[in-house]
Amino acid sequence: MATPEDIVNIALSNLGHSPQLVTSLSGTTTTEVLAGLHYPMARDALLSEINWNFAIKRAALKPNTTEPVFGFSNAYDMPSDMIRIIRTADGSKWRKEGAKLLSDTAPGTAVAITGATQANPVVITLAKLFPDSASVLFASVGGMSNLNGVIFQTDNPTSTTFELQGTDGTAFGAYTSGGTVQQLNVEVEYVFQETTTTNYPAQFVELLAFRLAAQLAPRLTDNANMTGQMWDIYNRKLAVAAHSDAVENTPRGFLSEDFLNARGSTFRDGNNWDLWAN
């Protein structure tokens, strides 16, 4: 599969670039310096354009200790590799602000634990039934500090215990006392910053090369027509890629009220309006 240098060289070939092709994005030639500057920006911009199936993750979010001043009840920390949120699992309203997601969905109440086994899997003892496959966060666990601040999934819950899904605790420190566990109720699906080019499908490689060509053309060719041609090709191929990637999913559809709300709503002063065809 293509390396970052290969993708840049494809971009240069799209421009009919005659100088020697690049061998490193940290090189010192003008082309290498420009390619090194533009490659990460072009990659992340393209990732943000489509819900690429190869670059989608799901994660439970940790609560942020600073609550929003107004508008929403809770704030959550975003994953560090997030490019763009696609949706939340519960379908609740949310807003992205900086590195936080704001939501009215609250995390579960922190529950005291009374035991944690050095076993495979780890078994947690507590006086509450947690759902199966719930995302949970531990804090202030004595002895078995490996649990603190890490998100785990529950497995085989009972009224007094649950296992940590796929977690081998035989090398963990021995539990001594204390600690709480909290269910995380905000889970997101998002496009992440995939940097491993061996995971890129051919369509993404081709698109990234055309986007790079469009960004590099003004400096390397000083030809406005060439720049425009590269952007035109990129945009046409992007539309095709969006359709191709979309058919690899079950259609999500929309709620009937979404259509109705698109026709009529209210102004800020509360007065109703509607759209009618004459």
Image (spheres, rainbow, N blue to C red):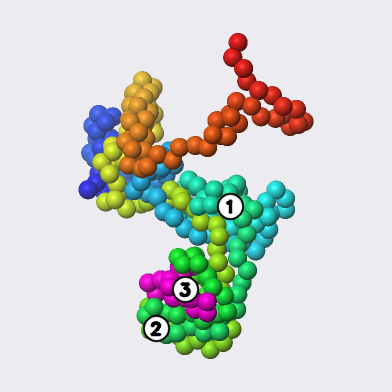
Q: Nearer the viewer, mark 1 or mark 3?
A: 3
Closer to the chain start, of discs 1 and 3, is 1
Magenta-span inclusion, residue 111: no
Query: In the rendering, which numbered label is found on residue 119?
Result: 2
State the SS at label 3.
loop
Gap between marks 1 and 3, in whole Å? 29 Å
Depth order, front residue of 135/157:
157
Give the vertical position of 219 relative to 150 (above or below).
Answer: above
Give the vertical position of 214 relative to 174 (above or below).
Answer: above
- The span picked out in magenta is 151-167
Give the vertical position of 105 relative to 135 (above or below).
Answer: above
Q: Quadrant of the C terminus?
A: top right
In the displayed image of the protein, which residue is found farthest to the right? Answer: 269
Q: Is residue 18 left or right of residue 169?
A: left
Closer to the chain start, of discs 1 and 2, is 1
Q: Label 2 sits on what residue type?
A: Ala
Q: Residue at x 77, y 31 (%)?
A: 269
Q: Is residue 208 left or right of residue 264?
A: left
Q: Nearer the viewer, mark 1 or mark 2?
A: 2
Q: Which residue is mark 1?
A: 101
In the displayed image of the protein, which residue is found farthest to the top? Answer: 278
Closer to the chain start, of discs 3 and 2, is 2
Q: Residue at x 37, y 42 (%)?
A: 250
Gap between marks 1 and 2, in whole Å? 35 Å
Q: Which residue is mark 3?
A: 157
Gap between marks 3 and 2, in whole Å? 16 Å
Is residue 212 visible in the rendered image? The answer is: no
State the SS at label 2.
loop
- Give x and y (percent) for residue 270: 76, 31
Depth order, front residue of 214/165:
165
Binning the other alpha carbons within 10 Å of mark 3 as few (below 14), some (14 to 19) or many (20 upward) gives some
